[in-house]
Amino acid sequence: MRRDDGVFRELIDDYLVECLPLAERVADGFVELERRRREGASEDGLLASLQGMLHTVKGNSAMMGLAPAQELAHALEDLSALLGRDGAPESEGGGAALLVAGGGLLVEQVRAAAEGGDPGRTAEFVAQVHAFAARTSEPTVPLGRRGGERRSAPETRPEGAANVVRVDFRRLDAMLEVLGEGLIEHSAVVEAFRRVARRGGAGEEIGDLDRAIVAMEKTMKRLEAVVMETRLLPISTVFGRFPRQLRDIAHSQRKRVRLVVSGGETSLDKAVLDRLGEPLLHLLNNAVVHGIEDPDERLRAGKPEEGTLELSAASQSGRVIIHLTDDGRGLDETKILAEAESLGLDVRSADPARIRALIFLPGFSTAAQVSQLAGRGVGLDVVAGSIRGLGGTIEVESRPGRGVTFVLDLPLTLAVVRSLIVEVDRERYAVPISQVAETVRTEPEAMRQINGRGVTLWRGDLIPVSDGGALLGTGGRPAAPRRFFVVISSGGRRRGVLVDRLMGHQDVVVKGLDRTLGRPEMVSGTTILGDGRVACILDAARILEREVPA
Amino acid sequence: MPNSFLVVDDSKLVHRMYRLIFSRGNLAGSTVYHANDGREGYSMLAAHPELSLVLLDLNMPQINGLELLIRRQAERLHLHVPIVLVTTETTAGDELRGRAAGAWDYLRKPFQPSDVESLVARVLAASPAASA
């Protein structure tokens, strides 16, 4: 026992920060390599760059005394060398698949480093590599001895890597919070200025002040944009994991599926991105398990044996739209209707969009929904909840027999949300405009009562209407009729909410709710408006889930 | 004058380890320069003729340790500064090539603080007393 054994143990976090991403890149790289070899595509120095990363993981694991990861990385280096030679034994020997398996194992071993890793599984894998080498009889490669040099491979380093700094994300959060305060205070200045200006008689200086405030507003907006930009990451950081995970799922389901990804460079706030991976993965799982048919069924349906999943992202007027399309069975609307009726839901008057949106309800499962993979209690209702929690929306389109498309509409950021400000009984509320279908001037004759519930005709549909005061708890019957109603929509459902005043659109800084308040029913956050008053940010999805008497 | 060292490695973890190593025992108080790649390493060597020792990782992308040594030899840069190649394993042939290019010795990874301490002791004992 050397006297300074274990002296590096305190560096375990640094080890993980460095080696876990490397291991993941190696694992993903091996999946990509397997695909390229299968399709006969050019490999472009991929293997060489992966070998470099393996070498680093091996060296670092060795320095940390982490033998399982070290020996595994070493075995993968040897195997890569075998497969990298000219005239190397190809995938028929299973070499590329063995690399893929090893890559996945390496990620696990590195991840488990704090607990010491799993020597047994490394030993197993090393044995497999030896067996492979023996089978493909390469007597000239003495496994276990490697040249120390790394050939200068054209490693794909990102452009301008020298210009990159690493910043703890919490610092960016802090920056955003201060910016938020600044925006709120700016609004206060604007409000105060307006009050002064309205009073008149302030002289010529008012013009200077006006110009200064306009200039400041422009600068604040630019500052907002710049701060938001520091938090943006390309969506490929989330998409990137999927090919490997999809391969595993498809394999276990004995289906053949390929994933086509586009728009990876589309950027999103890191806070949104961090919470997007899980729901997307569940949707992918779902598509493979329930959407894509097994190879025989597909052939019988005249489809290619291999199913295709298309995942794309694009930004569109301040939002990011994600499409996930499969060419599988599509939704069985008859089954959905039957299930809905058996649950006691009234769907007679529902339009097709509303019917399809039923699949996002909790407890809703057609026979096809339940599976152990997409299961463990995680269904589409949880996915929908996660997406809505991000301030996004999710909808589904279906082509029976031909497939399904999920459309996710997400905000670029969680921190600021463009909202419609409304006033009800002297209280102000912010409604995110993604949830506002329309604002309409009320015509009392157009309001009706059916079964004691208010309804009105809107764009050819009969939609329920609630009094804003009754809904939000500020009062029952208003003194004067409310002059407008706002049609809020989410998940295919809509409702009109009667309000007193519409106060325009505003970028509203979202402040969270203190946990001691519990989880209020219809409010997703709060903000401070320009006049210093607190306004609640309404959550249309939760509101629409409630049945409220008018 | 405390001894000064240059460590060249593309792994941030290894640099943290060097920091630990050079802050303990009889290496405490040393001045240590850190370079993250071959190019930076070469500039730092050029800027510091007073270095007692350079610990140079062999396996780096773009410019590896051996290439750096070869360039130094060709340009006759600070040939009095001992450079030790750090590597996970080498063959006899690799070692010959390294020494021919001017490597003073090899340090095997994984290494412990005591390995670096003994190496430094050997280097200091072997070199003529440095003049400030």
Image (cartoon, coloured by chain):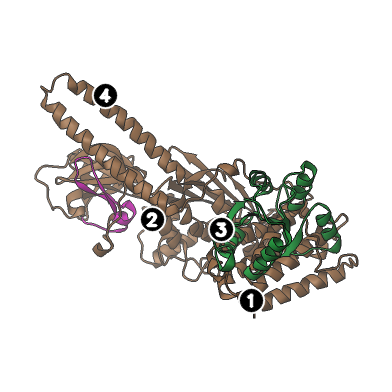
Chain colours: A brown, B green
Q: Is residue A541 magenta?
A: yes
**Visible in this render: residue B82?**
yes
Q: Secondary structure at mark 3?
A: helix
Q: Position of residue A357 (x, y in %)?
A: 43, 55
Mark 4 → mark 2, Cα distance in angstroms: 39 Å
Q: Which residue is mark 4?
A: A211
Structural crowding at the residue carrying mark 3, measured as other residues with C-alpha within 10 Å and reported as few (<14), some (14–19) or many (≥20): many
Mark 1 → mark 2, Cα distance in angstroms: 38 Å
Mark 1 → mark 4, Cα distance in angstroms: 67 Å
Q: Which residue is mark 3?
A: A284
Would residue A231 appear left or right of A50 to someone viewing this image? left
Q: Is A106 in front, or is B88?
A: B88
Q: Position of residue A528 (x, y in %)?
A: 24, 46
Quadrant including the N terminus of chain B: bottom right
Mark 4 → mark 3, Cα distance in angstroms: 52 Å
Would residue A110 appear left or right of A460 to someone viewing this image? right
Q: Secondary structure at mark 1?
A: loop
Structural crowding at the residue carrying mark 2, measured as other residues with C-alpha within 10 Å and reported as few (<14), some (14–19) or many (≥20): some
Name which residue type carries label 2. Gly
Residue A389: which disc?
2
Would residue A42 appear left or right of A172 to someone viewing this image? right
Q: Position of residue A215 (x, y in %)?
A: 31, 27
Mark 4 and mark 3, same subunit?
A: yes
Disc 4 chain ID: A
* Among the 4 quarters of the image, the one containing residue A305: bottom right
Q: Which residues are magenta?
A: A524-550
Which of the marked residues, 1 or 3, is nearer the chain's N terminus?
Answer: 1
- Frontmost of labels 2 and 3 is 2
Disc 2 chain ID: A
Q: Which residue is mark 1?
A: A118
Q: Is A269 in front, or is B7?
A: B7
* Among the 4 quarters of the image, the one containing residue A228: top left
